[in-house]
């Protein structure tokens, strides 16, 4: 589903290479985790894939079901089925959460040539999905993420994911700022979306999220490259020994 | 102090062609207004409150030509609202297009017909609030309006008005020079919503004096829209009694020059006055909100909320003052003026002022200028919202606080559609 080949990325503003040849293949139905120390390029990878400004791809490609993502506008990538759950969800004063969700859902449907969802159907679906994430009606009415706690913001990301039904979901440190209960809730939300036609790329610092969202493949990223790939046991190894051994091994 | 000769000459030239009617109570009020005007002279760019806005096209003998604008591709503003409709074409009352001036709880007369009597309730309001509003800041164009207005409505509200009164100003001539003056007097406990759309003339001067008696409620929503070349100067003078409410909202979309002044006096305890505006300008657009709020009683609340969206060299001006007089304790004053600059060519000039002579008050003010929030824009786009739609959502979000000052939901929705229409026509 997602194929990243030899991806090199530098910051647009300064001459600083962040990604130095990332290769990664994620197949439909799989959950991949990327772990790595601070500054290894994990978040940059998520931003570059979703089309954020400020980065320059100097080499390589990233395709979603064969289509080159890097040439698309952010909204085209979303319509193609890519979703990024932000590490820091953005507050948008003045835009109601419900209006935002509905605009997004219908914009994607329109881009794919589908009929817009009726107000009634939308409401029914959003309420049902919000309920499983313990998001109350009040939160749906408020402006996007404004005054939300850290946990509420992350739940709101998962709600958006559930409504938009993307095929390739990237979770960027979705566990950061979550307590144990919130992490469980968010993980359940993610697990409910797992199916054969959908894939996940879970970026995290810690193994604990992977206790809840069980990955098929674990990658270790350091210094702009994936230095090791393995099964779930690799995450445990990091948890026990830190990154130092792995980094030494590569060097 | 006598005016310099040049100022005297400019004023004489400006008013030479205007008709001055002396009869009745109105004649006396006009003479007083003319005396005020003669003492002040016309405004000039050097005047303190005209530094950001060049008044020369407003004071010129002839108005600059303004092509008639056809806005028929959009439903007329307030069309969906059940209202009493009064139409002025280039400042001239249009009886055929207007409803009968009859409304339960309200007396409505035309200034041009009621001015000849010797005694009239309007005597105590006409030019009176305007004259009070000349201190400490002179507003010569308002005095000129009081002296030479050709028509307008005298509205006395004795109960709860059955439906809103809507004044529609139609622009039909490329050289029209309209001067209209309205009075609204709300008796104790009365309630009225007044709507205005226009301005409808090449050059439009409008004054509205509003007396809000104790416990009365006045809502005002105005749409100044789409007519690119017209110029307008408007003044609202309001005086509020104890526990009275005054709320005014204006949307301005386009117009080469607009100067909207609001002069509000909270004269009775526990009165509430809100004035808000949303202005959208693209290109040759100069929009000026000049507001003066005086707190002269205890426990009053005032809010000024002004938002401007500017692009392609459009200019926005805000001059807003809160004056808290001695003894006006427990005053709650709030003022915010913000601009969203959609490119680097546009300009926002703001002069917020506070002057406080009481010690137990709460006054806050803020003024900002900024661009679209790129992070929010990316967030929306990453969810599949096209860039153009995302920008519009963020612009509407920026205007939301001002729009929130309209209490009636149907009216607010109508205005919201104007904003969306403007955004669609002026894509980024």
Image (cartoon, rainbow, N blue to C red):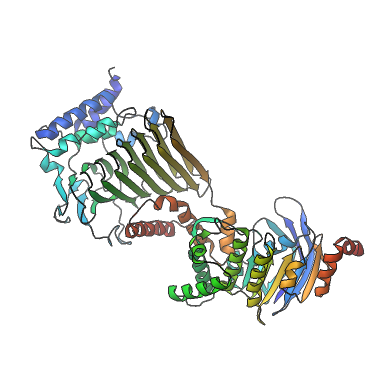
Q: Position of residue A8 (x, y in %)?
A: 76, 62
Circle count: 0
Left or right, B126 with reference to A176: left
Residue at (56% x, 59% y) in the render? A145
Residue B352 in view, yes or no:
yes
Asked if residue A62 lies left or right of residue B364, the reply is right
B346 on left or right of B299 = right
Q: Is residue B244 left or right of residue B332?
A: left
Q: Quadrant of the N terminus of chain B?
A: top left
Residue A6 in sight from this viewpoint: no
Residue B366 picture location, percent across and down = 49, 40
Height in image: A71 above or below B213? Answer: below
Residue B164, quarter of picture? bottom left
Report the front residue among B241 and A112: B241
Seen as rendered, the residue at the extreme top is B1
* Nearer to the camera, B174 or A229: A229
Q: x, y (%) of residue B352?
A: 45, 35
Q: Residue at x 85, y 62 (%)?
A: A242
Which x, y percent locates residue B334?
Answer: 43, 41
Where, by quadrant of the figure, is residue B356 drawn? top left
Farthest-out residue, bottom: A196
Q: Nearer the viewer, residue B138 or B18?
A: B138
Q: Residue at x 39, y 59 (%)?
A: B421
């Amino acid at each position: 589903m997602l194929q990243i080949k030899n991806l090199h990325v530098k910051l647009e503003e300064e001459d600083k290479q962040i990604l130095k040849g990332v290769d990664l293949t994620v197949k439909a139905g799989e959950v991949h985790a990327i772990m790595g120390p601070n500054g290894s390029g994990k978040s940059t990878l998520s931003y570059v894939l979703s089309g954020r400004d400020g980065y320059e791809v100097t080499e390589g490609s990233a395709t979603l079901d064969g289509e080159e993502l890097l040439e698309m506008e952010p909204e085209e990538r979303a319509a193609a089925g890519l979703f990024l759950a932000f590490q820091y969800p953005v507050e948008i004063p003045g835009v109601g959460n419900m209006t935002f969700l509905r605009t997004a859902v219908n914009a994607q449907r329109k881009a794919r040539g589908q009929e817009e969802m009726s107000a009634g159907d939308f409401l029914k679906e959003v309420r049902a999905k919000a309920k499983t994430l313990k998001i109350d009606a009040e939160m749906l009415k408020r402006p996007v993420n404004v005054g939300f706690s850290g946990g509420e913001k992350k739940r709101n990301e998962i709600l958006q994911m559930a409504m938009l039904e993307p095929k390739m979901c990237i979770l960027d440190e979705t566990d950061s700022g979550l307590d144990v209960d919130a992490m469980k809730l968010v993980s359940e939300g993610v697990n409910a979306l797992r199916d054969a036609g959908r894939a996940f790329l879970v970026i995290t610092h810690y193994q604990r999220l992977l206790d809840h969202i069980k990955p098929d493949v674990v990658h270790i990223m350091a210094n702009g490259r994936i230095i090791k790939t393995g099964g779930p046991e690799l995450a445990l190894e990091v948890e026990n020994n830190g990154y130092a051994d792995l980094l030494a091994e590569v060097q | 102090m006598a005016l310099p000769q040049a100022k005297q000459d400019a004023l004489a030239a400006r008013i030479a062609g205007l008709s001055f009617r002396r009869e009745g109570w109105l004649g006396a009020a006009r003479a007083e207004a003319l005396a005020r005007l003669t003492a002040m002279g016309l405004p000039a760019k050097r005047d303190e409150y005209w530094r950001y806005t060049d008044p020369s096209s407003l004071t010129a003998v002839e108005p600059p030509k303004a092509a008639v604008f056809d806005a028929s591709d959009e439903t007329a503003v307030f069309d969906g609202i059940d209202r009493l409709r009064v139409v002025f074409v280039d400042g001239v009352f249009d009886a055929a297009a207007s409803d009968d001036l009859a409304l339960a709880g309200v007396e409505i007369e035309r200034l041009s017909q009621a001015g000849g009597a010797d005694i009239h309730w309007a005597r105590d309001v006409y030019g009176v609030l305007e004259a009070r509003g000349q201190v400490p800041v002179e507003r010569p164009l308002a005095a000129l309006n009081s002296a030479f207005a050709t028509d307008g409505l005298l509205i006395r509200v004795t109960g709860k008005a059955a439906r809103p009164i809507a004044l529609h100003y139609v622009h039909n001539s490329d050289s029209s020079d309209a001067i209209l003056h309205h009075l609204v007097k709300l008796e104790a406990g009365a309630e009225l919503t007044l709507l205005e759309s226009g301005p409808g003339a090449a050059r439009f001067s409008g004054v509205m004096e509003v007396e809000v008696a104790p416990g009365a409620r006045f809502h005002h929503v105005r749409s100044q829209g789409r007519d690119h070349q017209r110029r307008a100067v408007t003044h609202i003078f309001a005086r509020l009694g104890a526990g009275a409410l005054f709320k005014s909202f204006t949307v301005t979309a386009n117009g080469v020059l607009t100067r909207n002044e609001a002069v509000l006096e909270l004269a009775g305890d526990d009165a509430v006055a809100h004035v808000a505006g949303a202005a959208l300008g693209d290109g040759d657009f100069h929009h000026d909100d000049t507001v003066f709020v005086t707190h002269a009683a205890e426990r009053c609340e005032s809010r000024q909320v002004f938002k401007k969206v500017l692009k392609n060299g459009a200019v926005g001006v805000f001059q807003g003052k809160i004056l808290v007089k001695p003894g006006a304790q427990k005053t709650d004053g709030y003022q915010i003026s913000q601009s969203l600059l959609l490119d680097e060519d546009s300009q926002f000039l703001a002069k917020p002022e506070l002057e406080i002579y009481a010690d137990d008050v709460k006054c806050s003010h803020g003024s900002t200028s900024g661009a679209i929030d790129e992070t929010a824009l990316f967030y929306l786009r990453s969810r599949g919202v096209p860039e153009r739609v995302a920008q519009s959502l963020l612009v509407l979000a920026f205007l939301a606080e001002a729009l929130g000052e309209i209490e009636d939901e149907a009216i607010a929705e109508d205005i919201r559609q104007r904003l969306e229409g403007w955004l669609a026509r002026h894509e980024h």
